[in-house]
Image (spheres, rainbow, N blue to C red):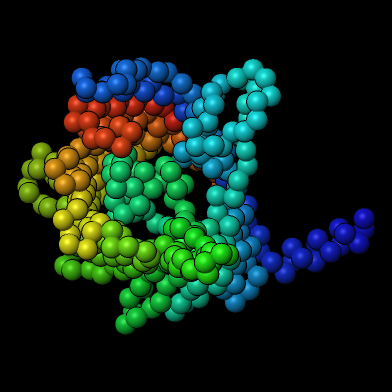
Amino acid sequence: MKRLICLLIVSLSFAAIEFSGDARFRPRLDVKKYGVASASNHTSDLYYLYRARINMKVDIGEGWFFSTKLGTNDIASMVKMSSHSIGGGITGNAGNFNSFKPDVNFLELYYGYAKENSGLWVGTFPLKYTPALDLHFYSDKLVDIPFVLYNNSSINGFAGYQMINDKKVNWFLSVDLNLTNIEEDFITGNETIRKDTYTIGFNYSFDVLNFTLTPNVLVALGEGNDLPKTFGLDIKLPQIQQSKLGSNIGETITGFFSSFSSSISYHMLSISSDNLNYADHFRIKITRPIIKGNMKFFYDIANMEDDSMSYMWLSYTHTCYKGDAGTVTISPTYRYQDGGYVIGTFDENYSRTKFEITTEIKFF
């Protein structure tokens, strides 16, 4: 036992290990309405969601690291109290509905190195969110941040960055579908050859005047001609500068708007070789600090060929406590979706309204 403790102490002294995490509790009122031709009923439901996640990162020196995140691999890592899981995060049938408990999964699990001029890692790793990921991987959903919800902001494969002319070019190669590549019929000897499916993505940021532009490119590689290709741009807009207008009213107005941070994005998706099947996605986003918190608003317009839908998010996050070891926040949030796909069929009269209050504790 003493040898084990000594070995642990020695190991910790040579590796910087960081633990962090978060936990949420979220009551939500969820209202869904469908078109007249839909077989689904209108529903209204009040339910309770919760989650907890643990992060660990180990630095062993010279840029080499290991990182992992533990949580439940369900939608947004959250599970619904006293209900079967939709995403598969809860298993077993132990008894009463309130006996169901969430499983623990590796939401992230990767290692590699990150140095000044380059980086490379492999495994299940996080991707910085952009609407391009929604459009590329979830063209059947398009709105309501599906990549964050269903992928838990992470993906399998390889990623890294390279400094080129003082610009950081980020890239990733995701393994989207693994197939048996060669299959030979035992009797006839005929071979069936299949290709795995990958997505390769690039982005980098540069400044033009006071705008920050981030082009995004995602291209799927694999079998067939109906593989998605996504191109677009995230644009961070400049803040309004304080101006001396010579009046208290003018200074108050510009002072209020100078605290806003805003951005827009536009991305296009093609899912056929002749570019006849397409989708696009536009977003405007505004954030502003208010008192001891932060307001966030964004509005999406998305189209898949002739099908059109919109989505709105409005939230305010209030910081209840902030200390050296973590924070506690509460976030009332309103979300509204107009139009959408119901079991693979577009319903122009579909709508979903979500009002929720999220309490969260983070530690680091």
Left/right of residue 356 with respect to residue 131 in the rendered view = right
Hey, which residue is sitting farthest left in the picture? 246
Q: Nearer the viewer, residue 219 or 151?
A: 219
Q: Quadrant of the N terminus?
A: bottom right
Where is residue 212? Give x, y as percent.
Answer: 24, 63
Left/right of residue 364 with respect to residue 295 in the rendered view = right
Where is residue 275? Give x, y as percent.
Answer: 17, 59
Instruction: Identify which residue is drawn at 60% across, 19% down.
Output: 97
Q: Nearer the viewer, residue 66 or 154?
A: 154
68 to 259, vertically: above or below: below
Instruction: Identify which residue is drawn at 20% across, 46% down.
Output: 304
Q: Which corner quadrant of the image does residue 319 belong to?
A: top left
Hey, which residue is sitting farthest right in the picture? 2
Q: Nearer the viewer, residue 218 or 237?
A: 218
Hey, which residue is sitting farthest front in the picture? 187
Left/right of residue 86 with respect to residue 207 in the rendered view = right
244 to 71, vertically: above or below: below
Where is residue 281? Give x, y as percent.
Answer: 21, 49
The answer to whether residue 321 is visible is: no
The answer to whether residue 179 is visible is: yes
Number of on-image labels: 0
Instruction: Identify which residue is drawn at 37% across, 64% down.
Output: 223
Instruction: Identify which residue is drawn at 46% across, 38% down.
Output: 75
Q: Which corner quadrant of the image does residue 145 belong to?
A: top left
Q: Nearer the viewer, residue 125 or 361?
A: 125
